[in-house]
């Protein structure tokens, strides 16, 4: 007959170390882990993509006469006129720069010129 195995008492405190990194993305805390089940976020913060889409929709409202001015547009949308002006400037970005942003290749935006060649030169750094 086998001898009964003596069970070891369990420790009262168990410490588990999980390698994690906390980063801020889009003003939100994000956990990036080194373990396979805690994969880093592969998608990007789509705020800039939403802003570009909104800017083009708002520009279309002004161009088709639905809103007569930026002032009327900002009142209709319930936003500050300054915000509406800043957002509408996104419609001045070169098409290849917008494509790069949406393809997640270029997310660094600084104040840019309205000229597409100047935009490309500024973002080429």
Image: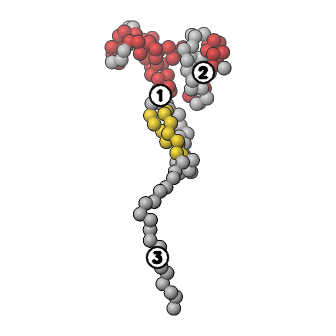
Quick one: SS at disc 2? helix
Location of residue 85 (image quadrant): top left
In this rendering, which labeled residue sits more in front, label 2 or label 3?
Answer: 3
As drawn, 58 above or below 23: above
What residue is pinned by disc 1?
Answer: 47
Residue 59 seen: no
Mark 1 vs mark 3: which is more N-terminal?
3
Q: Report the colour scheme.
A: secondary structure
What residue is pinned by disc 3?
Answer: 7
> Which of the pair 114/4 is nearer the observer?
4
> Which of the pair 56/24 is nearer the observer?
24
Mark 2 vs mark 1: which is more N-terminal?
1
- For label 2, the crowd category at 10 Å Cα-Cα, with few meaning under 14, some 14 to 19 and many 20 or more, is some
- For label 3, the crowd category at 10 Å Cα-Cα, with few meaning under 14, some 14 to 19 and many 20 or more, is few
Residue 10 percent coordinates (x, y) = 44, 68
> Which of the pair 37/99 is nearer the observer?
37
Look at 49% across and 55% down and name the residue there.
16
| Most distant residue in the bottom direction | 1
In this rendering, which labeled residue sits more in front, label 2 or label 1?
Answer: 1
What residue is pinned by disc 2?
Answer: 97
What mark, if any, has residue 87 been given in the picture? none
- For label 1, the crowd category at 10 Å Cα-Cα, with few meaning under 14, some 14 to 19 and many 20 or more, is few
In this rendering, which labeled residue sits more in front, label 1 or label 3?
Answer: 3
Look at 65% across and 12% down and name the residue there.
117
Residue 102 seen: yes
> Which of the pair 15/18 is nearer the observer?
15
Mark 2 vs mark 3: which is more N-terminal?
3
As drawn, 112 above or below 53: above
Look at 35% across and 10% down and name the residue there.
72
Q: Are marks 2 and 1 in contact (CB under 8 Å)?
A: no
């Amino acid at each position: 007959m086998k001898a009964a195995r003596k069970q070891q008492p369990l420790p009262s405190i168990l410490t588990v170390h999980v390698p994690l990194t906390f980063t801020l993305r889009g003003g939100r805390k994000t956990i990036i882990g080194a373990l396979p089940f805690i994969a880093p976020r592969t998608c990007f913060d789509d705020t800039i993509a939403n802003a570009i889409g909104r800017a083009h929709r708002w520009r279309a409202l002004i161009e088709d006469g639905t809103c007569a001015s930026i002032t009327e547009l900002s009142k209709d949308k319930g936003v500050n006129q300054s915000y509406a002006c800043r957002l509408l400037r996104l419609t001045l970005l070169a098409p290849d720069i917008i494509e790069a942003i949406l393809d997640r290749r270029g997310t660094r935006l600084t104040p840019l010129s309205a000229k597409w060649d100047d935009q490309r030169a500024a973002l080429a750094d």
